[in-house]
C-alpha cells in the first residue's frame, strides 16, 4: 500500500520561506532565507550586507544597532516585515584571492505561527534540485543541476526551466523535492556565465550546531520500511564490543565533518543516512568488525543504492583525476562497463560520472564498475597512473575485493589501453617449404593492433609461390601500410623451426631506388603462429613493462632451462648460445612464456653477447624494436655488419594469433591456408 503523499511536494519549503529587506523599503526583497528551527532562519551574510548598504563582501560582523535596519517577511504569512537579531555570522572572507569561505548569517525572529514550518537541512545524493526567486513565488521556479562539489560548495548549472538563477536568488534554499529537505543555500552567480554556486547543507548544519541551534528533523516521518531498516542497522551496532561504538562514532563524525559526535547507535545510523556518503563512512569505521559491517551493508542496500566511496576517497579521486578528466573517464567507462548509458545530463562533469558509476552495484568480492573504470584511466595515463592504482587498491582493500579479481581487472585494463594506443600493423603468416624457395603466405593489414577484422588481405591462392611472388605481394602490402603516419611495423608469424629465416632482408619495391630490405625502413619482428602458455607470457610481459628485471643473457641451453624455469620475472632474453642449440632455446623461451628474444643469426659467444647487450637499453619495452631497426639501417647492404643478422622475437600478448578454424591461417592446425 502506498503512503499518502502531500499534494504539494514543495509545500514544506514554501512554509519555511523568508525574504530579507532593508527596513522601510518596499519591494520583493534583496534576497531569501529559510526557517531551519523554531524562531531561526538562515540567509547569506552578503544579503545582510546588502540590506545594510555595505559592500557585499564586508567581513566585519554587523553590530546589534546595525541589524535593526534589517527585516524579514514570510510569504506564507503575508507582506508584514519583522525585525531580526543576528545570532551567528560566517563572513564571506576571500581566500587565495579567488574564493571565500562561508557567507552565512543565522537570524532570530520573535515570531511563532503555526503556518511557519522549519525545514530539514541535510546533504542528499540528489542532483536535480529546485529553487525560487527571493519572494518564493510559485511561478518563479528554477530547476538547477549540481555539477560538482568543491569543499563546502556546490557548482550549479541550469536545469530545464526557462528561468535562470539571478543575483536576487542569494539565500534561497536548494530544495530536494524527492527527499523533502534543503540540501544547500544559493550564494552567488557568475556574471555572463550560466554557472552558479551554493553552500552545502553540511556547512549550514555545522554553523547551527556551533550556535546551539538544532535544525528540524526529517521532512516526513519515515515510512515503515525505512524505520525497519534503520532499526536493523542500529541493532547491528549493538553487536560492537564495549567502547567501540564511541570510537566508531568519532571516526564517522570526523569523516562526515560533523561538529557533534553521535552518542547512540540510533544517532550514528541517522547521521550516516542523512549524508550521501554516510554509509561508506560507517562501513569504513567497521572494517575490524566484518559481521557487524555485513549486517549494516545488507540493511542499507534494502533502502536503495549505497554510495561506494567515503567522502575522503571521493575527494581524493577528484584531485587525482583533475577537473578536465570528463572525456577521459567517460571514454574509459564506455569500454570497461558494458551497455553503459549515463542518466545525468547537462554540462560535462567528472563528479557526476563517478557518482553514476558508484550506483552500479556489483557482487561482493567482485571489482566494482567504478574501480574498473579508474583502472582503465590509470592504464591509459603516462603520468599519474600509479597514484590512481594506489587509490583504487586502498578502496578495494576496504571493500574486501578478491586480489585475483583485482589482478585480472588490471590486466584487462592494460590490454584495452594497449589496444587503443596501438598503431596499424602488417602481419605476415609464412609457411616456407623445406629445402626449397617456395612459400605459402597470408598477409593481413590491421588498422589497429586489436582483435578486429583486417583492412586488406593478400594470400597465395592455395598455390606455392616463389620468393619473387612473395616479395611482390609484400611490396603491395607495405605500400598500403606506409599510407599511415605511424605504424607498429611488420610481424612475421612463423612455425617453430623457421625462426632462422632472414625475413627482415626480404626485398620490397622502393620506386626509383629499386628494392630495399623490408627491415630497413620498418620495424620487423618475429612471432609464433600458436600461443603456448599465454598466462605465463602475460605475467612476464608485465614484469618487463615495469622493468623489474634486466634482460637475461643466455649462453647455454641446459643452464638456461633451470634459470628461466625458476625466474618468472625474466621477460627479455639475449640468446648467444651455439647455433645447434638455437631452435631448442627458442622453443624453451616460448614454452616458458618469454615474450622477447634477441639473437644474431650468424654468431654467438661473449663478444656477440656484449654487442647485443648494447642494443637493449633500460627502456627496451618501448625502444627495442626501433633499436634493432637502426642496427639494420647501419648494416644497409653490408652482410658483415651485426645489424644484417639480427633477429627479434616479439610476442606482445596484447594481441594473440586467433586459433579458430578459418580465422587462423596455420597449416598444422587445419586452418584456411
Image (spheres, rainbow, N blue to C red):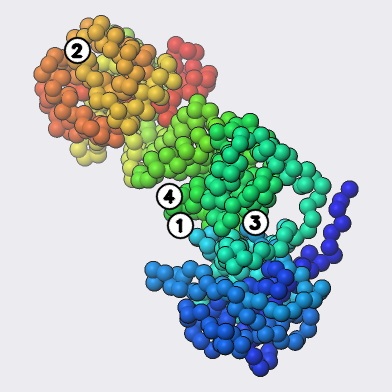
Task: Look at mark 2 in the image and give the residue it sits on.
Answer: 555
Residue 308 at x, y percent in the picture: 58, 43
Residue 120 at x, y percent in the picture: 70, 63
Whole-angstrom CA distance, mark 2 to mark 3, is 67 Å
**What numbered label is drawn on residue 323?**
1
Task: Look at mark 3 in the image and give the residue it sits on.
Answer: 124
Which element carries disc 1, helix, strand or loop?
A: loop
- The relative height of residue 89 versus residue 551 in the rendered view (above or below) is below
Residue 292 at x, y percent in the picture: 64, 34
Kindly check if marks 4 and 2 are in contact, taking CB atoms under 8 A apart as contact. Answer: no
Task: Look at mark 4 in the image and give the residue it sits on.
Answer: 320
- The relative height of residue 593 versus residue 160 in the rendered view (above or below) is above
Kindly check if marks 1 and 3 are in contact, taking CB atoms under 8 A apart as contact. Answer: no
What's the residue at 42%, 30% (across, down)? 654
Kindly check if marks 2 and 1 are in contact, taking CB atoms under 8 A apart as contact. Answer: no
Question: In terms of image quadrants, where is residue 523?
Answer: top left
Q: Is residue 546 left or right of residue 154?
A: left
Within 10 Å of disc 3 (Cα), the crowding (few <14, some 14-19, many 20+) is many
Whole-angstrom CA distance, mark 4 to mark 2, is 47 Å
Kindly check if marks 1 and 4 are in contact, taking CB atoms under 8 A apart as contact. Answer: no
What's the residue at 54%, 55% (across, down)? 257
Whichever of labels 4 and 3 marks the residue nearer the N terminus, that label is 3
**What numbered label is drawn on residue 607?**
none
Callout in the foreground (1, 3):
3
Question: In terms of image quadrants, where is residue 85?
Answer: bottom right
Whichever of labels 2 and 3 marks the residue nearer the N terminus, that label is 3
Whole-angstrom CA distance, mark 1 to mark 3, is 22 Å
Pick the front one: 576 or 170: 170
Amino acid at each position: 500500500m502506498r503512503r499518502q503523499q502531500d499534494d504539494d511536494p514543495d509545500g514544506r519549503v514554501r512554509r519555511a520561506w523568508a525574504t530579507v529587506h532593508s527596513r522601510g523599503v518596499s519591494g520583493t526583497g534583496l534576497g531569501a532565507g529559510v526557517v531551519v528551527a523554531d524562531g531561526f532562519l538562515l540567509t547569506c551574510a552578503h544579503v545582510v550586507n546588502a540590506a545594510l548598504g555595505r559592500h557585499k563582501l564586508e567581513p566585519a560582523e554587523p553590530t546589534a544597532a546595525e541589524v535593526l535596519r534589517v527585516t524579514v517577511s514570510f510569504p506564507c504569512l503575508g507582506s508584514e516585515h519583522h525585525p531580526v537579531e543576528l545570532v551567528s555570522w560566517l563572513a564571506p572572507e576571500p581566500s587565495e584571492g579567488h574564493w571565500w569561505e562561508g557567507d552565512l548569517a543565522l537570524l532570530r525572529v520573535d515570531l511563532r505561527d503555526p503556518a511557519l514550518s522549519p525545514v530539514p537541512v541535510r546533504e542528499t545524493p540528489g542532483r536535480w534540485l529546485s529553487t525560487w526567486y527571493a519572494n518564493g513565488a510559485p511561478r518563479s521556479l528554477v530547476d538547477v543541476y549540481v555539477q560538482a562539489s568543491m569543499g563546502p560548495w556546490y557548482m550549479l548549472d541550469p536545469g530545464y526551466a526557462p528561468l535562470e538563477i539571478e543575483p536576487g536568488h542569494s539565500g534561497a534554499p536548494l530544495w530536494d523535492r524527492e527527499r523533502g529537505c534543503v540540501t544547500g543555500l544559493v550564494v552567488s552567480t557568475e556574471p555572463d556565465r550560466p554557472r552558479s554556486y551554493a553552500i552545502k547543507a553540511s556547512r549550514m548544519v555545522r554553523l547551527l550546531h556551533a550556535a546551539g541551534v538544532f535544525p528540524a528533523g526529517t521532512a516526513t516521518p519515515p515510512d515503515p520500511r525505512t524505520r525497519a531498516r534503520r532499526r536493523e542497522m542500529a541493532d547491528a551496532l549493538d553487536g560492537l564490543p564495549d567502547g567501540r561504538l564511541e570510537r566508531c562514532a568519532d571516526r564517522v563524525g570526523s569523516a562526515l565533518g560533523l561538529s557533534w559526535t553521535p552518542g547512540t547507535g540510533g544517532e550514528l545510523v541517522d547521521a550516516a543516512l542523512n549524508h550521501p556518503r554516510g554509509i561508506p563512512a560507517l562501513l569504513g569505521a567497521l572494517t575490524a568488525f566484518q559481521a557487524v559491517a555485513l549486517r549494516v551493508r545488507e540493511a542499507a542496500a534494502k533502502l536503495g543504492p549505497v554510495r561506494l566511496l567515503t567522502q575522503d576517497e571521493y575527494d581524493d579521486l577528484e584531485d587525482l583525476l583533475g577537473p578536465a578528466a570528463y572525456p577521459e573517464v567517460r571514454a574509459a567507462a564506455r569500454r570497461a562497463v558494458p551497455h553503459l548509458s549515463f542518466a545525468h545530463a547537462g554540462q560535462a562533469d567528472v563528479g557526476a560520472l563517478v557518482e553514476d558509476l558508484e550506483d552500479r552495484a556489483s557482487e561482493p568480492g567482485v571489482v566494482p564498475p567504478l574501480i574498473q573504470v579508474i583502472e582503465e584511466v590509470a592504464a591509459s595515463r603516462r603520468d599519474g597512473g600509479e597514484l590512481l592504482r594506489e587509490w583504487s587498491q586502498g578502496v578495494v582493500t576496504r571493500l574486501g575485493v578478491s586480489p585475483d579479481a583485482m589482478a585480472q581487472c588490471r590486466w584487462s585494463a592494460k590490454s584495452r589501453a594497449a589496444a587503443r594506443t596501438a598503431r596499424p600493423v602488417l602481419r605476415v603468416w609464412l609457411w616456407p617449404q623445406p629445402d626449397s624457395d617456395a612459400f605459402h603466405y597470408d598477409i593481413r593489414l590491421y588498422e589497429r593492433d586489436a582483435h578486429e577484422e583486417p583492412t586488406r588481405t593478400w594470400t597465395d591462392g592455395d598455390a606455392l609461390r616463389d620468393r619473387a611472388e612473395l616479395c611482390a605481394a609484400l611490396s603491395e602490402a607495405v605500400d598500403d601500410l606506409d599510407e599511415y603516419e605511424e605504424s607498429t611495423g611488420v610481424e612475421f608469424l612463423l612455425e617453430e623451426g623457421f625462426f632462422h629465416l632472414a625475413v627482415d632482408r626480404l626485398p620490397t619495391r622502393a620506386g626509383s631506388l629499386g628494392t630495399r630490405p623490408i627491415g630497413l625502413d620498418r620495424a620487423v619482428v618475429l612471432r609464433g603462429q600458436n600461443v603456448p602458455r599465454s598466462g605465463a607470457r602475460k605475467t612476464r610481459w608485465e614484469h618487463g613493462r615495469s622493468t623489474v628485471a634486466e634482460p637475461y643473457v643466455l649462453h647455454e641451453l641446459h643452464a638456461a632451462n633451470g634459470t628461466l624455469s625458476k625466474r618468472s620475472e625474466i621477460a627479455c632474453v639475449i640468446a648467444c648460445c651455439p647455433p645447434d642449440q638455437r631452435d631448442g632455446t627458442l622453443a624453451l623461451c616460448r614454452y616458458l612464456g618469454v615474450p622477447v628474444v634477441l639473437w644474431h643469426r650468424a654468431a654467438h659467444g661473449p663478444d656477440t653477447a656484449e654487442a647485443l647487450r648494447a642494443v637493449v637499453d633500460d627502456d627496451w619495452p618501448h625502444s627495442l624494436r626501433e633499436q634493432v631497426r637502426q642496427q639494420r639501417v647501419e648494416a644497409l647492404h653490408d652482410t658483415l655488419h651485426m645489424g644484417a643478422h639480427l633477429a627479434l622475437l616479439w610476442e606482445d600478448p596484447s594481441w594473440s594469433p586467433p586459433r579458430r578454424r578459418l580465422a587462423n591461417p596455420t597449416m598444422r592446425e587445419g586452418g584456411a591456408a
